[in-house]
Image: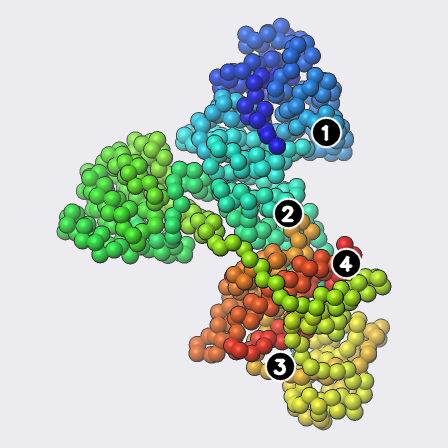
Amino acid sequence: MSLESFFNPESVAIVGASRQKGKVGHEILTNMIGAGYEGRIFPVNPKADAIEGLECYPSLKAIGSKPDLVIVIVPAKAVPAVMRECAKIGVKSVIIITAGFKEVGEEGKELENQVLRIARQAGIRVIGPNCLGAIAPANKVNASFGGDLPSAGAIAYLSQSGALLAAILDMANASGIGFSKLVSIGNKTDIDELDLIKALGPDPDTKVIAGYLESISDGNAFVREAEQISHQKPILLMKSGATEAGAQAASSHTGSLAGSETAYECMFERAGIIRCESIKQQFDYAQAFANQPLPAGPRVAVITNAGGPGIMAADAIEQQGLTFAKLDDTTVAKLSAALPAAANVHNPIDVLGDALADRYELALEAALDDPNVDAVLVLLTPQAMTESAGTARVTVKMARQKPSKPILACFLGAAKVKEGVGILREGKIPQYDSPESAVGTIKAMADYARWRSRPKRVVKLFGVNRRKVENIVERHLRQSVYEIGEAESKEMLEAYGFVTPKGSIATTAEQAANIAQQLGYPVVLKIWSPDILHKSDVGGVKVGLKGEQQVRDAFDLMMYRIPKKLPEANILGVLVQEMCGGGKEVILGMNRDPHFGPLMMFGMGGIMVEVLKDVSFYPAPLTADEAKQMLLNTKTYQMLKGVRGEEGVDIEAVAEGLQRLSQLVTEFPQIQEMDINPYVVGPEGTTPIAVDARISVQQV
Ligand code: ADP
Ligand code: MG
């Protein structure tokens, strides 16, 4: 879908144009004129003959030709009539600035629905209502009341908050940040964030898509599209507010660990979307992404004329998980030969307080030529001799001569560095107000570059017994049973290649002792009832039973105590199970997000899972790398690897378990939620065991 008429209209009608200064209907008109718009503008207002020297029309029809874009500012109640008029004369693109629609309640919502119906019937695309408008600087289009036309640049911005967009415009205009397009999506009754990224993805004028969103209408479609686009250009998002998904029932203990925030977090990660915490951070990032190449790796070289900022940068590099570049011997030799003896010729390269622009130039050249350097940060403090403007000039020059590595600058100070900062901006070198924000930006670039260069996702498919699972799931659904008990949950897991502990059900102490004898000691006894979800909570699990007497006693005690505690529970007996010793307990799980589908979960298992919340999530289906990464994203991973000489567990086997589970939940969308807790994993070469499992299903 093309949004060309919004950003590059041949003619524009402004319905509700006003003579009165300060009114939105006046602002938009003067903004369009002030932007130098080259097409025709038709103000529509039955009460005026001319506004700002332009002939005014009593109605859209009276114009006599079809405007390419119509901007509507009339009161909400009058908007449907304007829409009908648009439909009649064949207008295809409308921006409704007017507020007073769904954001004010039922009546407004009805009005908005009416507008949407007319638009859909007539094939009209609508931005808004309740928005600030749209801006395309290169085309001299300022169809907004947000402020002056910003300069043209490579950043596209879409905002769900009009007020925020006004603030961004003000800030950008003050610091000379340029945009390709800016759109305030308002109530997004028709055009939403998905339409916009679809249009901006292939837009040659847009190198970076940035946005502020409070809700995402179709989360799944959005991240799918974003994932495609992220291969071409970065998407930087600020996302605030929870979604309807946040209201989902937290039906089981593990499911409740994944909120909608988590879902967004990991879907964004999967789609390569770069999440920003503030407008400042977003523009810190956007300027670098729009104007500098991506770093090939994480190794940063710092050039400075003062020790303090150099140390601050070094600390930030360390903290952010980037690498402090180790300069090549030839670079060190070059620098030693050229710089004064007191200079530091290792990273951070200290060109000293009395450095003029020439020292920066040769240090920059050396750093950019160094094969061990992926990005360069130029720090400057305005000391007595410092040439801030000259240094800015040589930085711009070097960036042009050696355009393959990113250069970021941090000229600290205010009045004394002002001219230099202006030259940097002009020369497209991003400038930061602290070493930390510059380093944070390099980190975002390095992460994104890594995302882009990751191998193509290949999801391994295991040979499984799908039919068996299908039978179990369908039988439950036919009988309207939505919780699959432990025994059949484990059968399903076995069908997908999991190993579960051996064991059988006993209904007498005698039987329990016999089963234990066959299994071999030690054994575990567990209460067996479809009505008891958390067995240990009611004293229904006894581990480490070492002989016949202990088994008989444990059996008798359970069968005496639990029915007293839970008289309603249907107790079928006691499960006598082999004991899995020596392993570590982890949890593998899945929670199906209503917007994003299955989210896999991994974390520390056993009863501590809810307390420690050391869990990680990622959308299924998982690749081997993604499964591995899920493990790495937890602290549990350190424990699994083995702490202080203690033997580690078979990490690959755990990752494989996650992949198998991911296949199961991908092939069975009926599975809403499940967990294996504990999944007992032992040393390398041993097979992990799914000791306990539960699965809940739903008709889909
Ligand atoms: P529930 O989660 O319903 O309380 P589980 O079957 O998960 O019941 O058992 C509770 C805990 O007992 C497990 O987390 C594990 O620590 C231990 N446990 C249970 N079965 C075994 C077994 N077969 N081998 C080793 N430990 C076990
Ligand atoms: Mg359990």
Residue 150 vs residue 575: left or right? left
Depth check, mark 1 against mark 3: the one in front is: 1
For the residue marked with disc 2, what is the amino acid?
Asn
Residue 106 location, x and y as percent? 76, 34
Quote the CA–CA distance across marks 3 and 4. 32 Å
Quote the CA–CA distance across marks 1 and 3. 62 Å
- Ligand 1 neighbours mark 3 (CB distance < 8 Å): yes
For the residue marked with disc 4, what is the amino acid?
Gln
Callouts 2 and 3 close, C-beta under 8 Å: no
Residue 667 vs residue 268: left or right? right
Quote the CA–CA distance across marks 4 and 2. 20 Å
Mark nearer the N terminus (1 vs 3): 1
Q: Quadrant of the C terminus?
A: bottom right
The mark found on residue 580 in the picture is 3
Mark nearer the N terminus (4 vs 2): 2
Element class at badge 2? helix
Mark nearer the N terminus (2 vs 3): 2
Element class at badge 1? helix
Query: Pointer 4: what residue?
Result: 698
Query: Pointer 2: what residue?
Result: 220
Give the residue drawn at x 56%, y 31%. Answer: 183
Query: Pointer 1: what residue?
Result: 120
Give the residue drawn at x 80%, y 63%. Answer: 474
Mark nearer the N terminus (1 vs 2): 1
Quote the CA–CA distance across marks 4 and 1. 34 Å
Callouts 1 and 2 close, C-beta under 8 Å: no
Element class at badge 3? loop
For the residue marked with disc 3, what is the amino acid?
Cys
Give the residue drawn at x 52%, y 64%. Answer: 628
